[in-house]
Image (cartoon, helix red, strand yellow):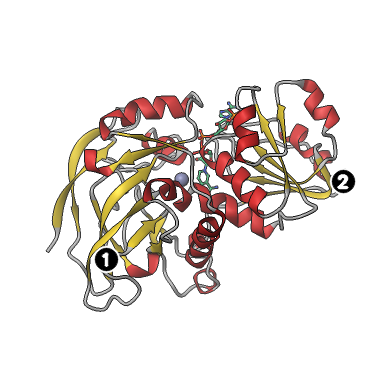
Amino acid sequence: MAITVPAYAAPSAKAPLERITVTRRDLGEHDVLIEIRYSGICHSDIHQARDEWGGAQFPMVPGHEIAGVVTEVGSGVTRHAVGDRVGVGCFVDSCRECANCLAGDEQYCLKGMTGTYNSVGRDGEPTHGGYSTHVVVDENYVLRIPEALALDVAAPLLCAGITLYAPLKRWQAGPGQQVAVVGLGGLGHIGVKIADALGAEVTVLSRSLGKREDALRLGADHYRSTTDPATFTELDGRFDLIVNTVSANLDVDAYLGLLKLDGTLVYLGAPEYPASVNVFSLINGRRNIAGSMIGGIAETQEMLDFCARHGIGADIEVIAADRINEAYDRVVASDVRYRFVIDAATI
Ligand code: NAP
Ligand code: ZN
C-alpha cells in the first residue's frame, strides 16, 4: 500500500523549504522501503531548489545523500533484507539496456537516468528525495553501507563521495601523482581524504587561509590560497590532475596553467553560467579539460567499501529539519565544515 510521509520541500524557486507530505508508491516486486535516518545537504540541492540550472519541478523534495535502514521488501527482492543498512544516491532508476547502463555507467543512461528528486519516475510520477522519513526505491539502485561506517557520516558519500572517487580513479590518482583539489567544501573535503588514501600527493587550493589546519588534518600535504597571486606562479606546471569542486566560475586558464604536460582539469562543480577558455591554454602543454558526474551503481558500492576500509566518512554537522533554510544560506556562504546532514527523526 502506498504511504504518506512527511518531507521538506521547496514550494517554488527561491522560496524557503517547508514541511509537506508526499506519497511513496506501493512496494513493487523489486522495491525496498527505506526508513531514512540521515540525509546530506549537497550544493546541488540548493542549485535545483533555487532553479539555478533551469527546469526545476515544484514542489521539490531535495536530497540525494540518503542513509537508512530497510523496513520492508517486495516479494522478488534478493539484494537487500529487512534491517539492512543502506544508501541511495543521485538516481533511482535508468533504462538498464543502453550501452552505458550495460557498462555500469547508469548515471549516463542514454535514455536519461531517473533522478532521486526533481525528475519523473518510469511510472510517470514525480520523484521526491531524501529530506523525508521514508523512500521506496528499486533494489538495484540501493547500496549497502558497510558496518564500519556510521550512517550519519556515510550519507554524504552517496553523492560527494562517489563524485570524487570516480574521477580520482579514472585519472589514476595514486603514488607519485600530484593532485590538486580546488574548493574545500562538501565535495572537496571528501576528495582530499580519498586522494590521500589512494596515495597521491594532495594540494588544497582554497580562497582563504582559513581552512588550512582542517585541510592538513583531512590528509592534504600542501595548502595554498588562490587569492595569493604567488600561488599561480609558484605552482605553474605542478599537477597531473586538478579536481575542481567550486560551485562558481573560475579563471579556467589560470588553473590550466597549473597542469603538467598531458595534465587534466576535471570539472565537478556545476555553476549556472558557462565557462570560457582560451584554447592556447590547452594547446600549450597538451592539456585536457574534462567533466565527471557522480558514478555508476557498482562503482558507488566499490567507493563505499573503499571508504569503510580506510575509515573515511564525511566531517558533518547534524541539524534538525527546521534548520534546512539556514543551512542552505550557510552552504552558499561556504560556512560549513564540511557537510550538513539532516537528522530524519526531526522531520
Ligand atoms: P560546497 O560545500 O558549497 O563547496 C564548494 C566550495 O567551493 C566552497 O566550500 C568554496 O571552497 C568554493 N567556492 C564557493 N564559492 C566560490 C567562489 N565564488 N569562488 C571560488 N570558490 C568558491 O558545495 P558542494 O556540495 O561541495 O558542491 C560543489 C559543486 O559541485 C556544486 O556546484 C554542486 O552542484 C556540484 N556537484 C557536482 C556533482 C557532479 O556529479 N559533478 C555532484 C555533486 C555536486 P573554499 O572556501 O575552499 O574556497
Ligand atoms: Zn549531490
Query: Mark 1 Cα within 10 Å, few/some/many (few <14, many 20+)?
Result: many
Residue 290 in view in this figure:
yes
Rendered image quadrant of residue 208:
top right
How many numbered dots are placed on residues in this image? Answer: 2
Quarter assignment of residue 21: top left
Q: Amino acid at mark 2?
A: Gly
Viewer-closest of 153 and 335: 153
Which badge, 1 or 2, is on the more N-terminal residue? 1
| Callouts 1 and 2 close, C-beta under 8 Å | no
Residue positioned 14% across, 60% down in the render = 2
Q: Residue at x 41, y 54 (%)?
A: 89
Residue in the picture at 75% in, 21% down:
228
* 10 Å crowding of disc 2: few (<14), some (14-19), many (20+): some
Q: Which residue, given by chain and number where applicable, does mark 2 sit on?
A: 285
Q: Say above or below: 327 vs 63.
A: above
Residue pointed to by mark 1: 32
Q: Nearer the viewer, residue 138 or 341?
A: 341
Q: Could you say which is closer to the camera, residue 266 or residue 142? A: 142
Q: Is mark 1 within 8 Å of ligand 2?
A: no
Answer above or below: position of 99 versus 143: below
How far across and how far down the image is residue 206, in percent?
Answer: 65, 29
Q: Which mark is residue 165?
A: none
**Tag 2 secondary structure:** loop
Residue 181 place in picture, x, y as percent: 66, 40
Q: Residue at x 14, y 56 (%)?
A: 3
Name the side, left or right, on which 317 lies relative to 75.
right
Q: Quadrant of the N terminus?
A: bottom left
- Residue 217 image offset from top left, x and y in percent: 61, 36
Image coordinates of residue 234 in percent, x first then y, are 85, 29
- Judged from this view, the residue extending furthest toward the left is 1
How far is disc 1 from disc 2 in space, using C-alphas? 50 Å
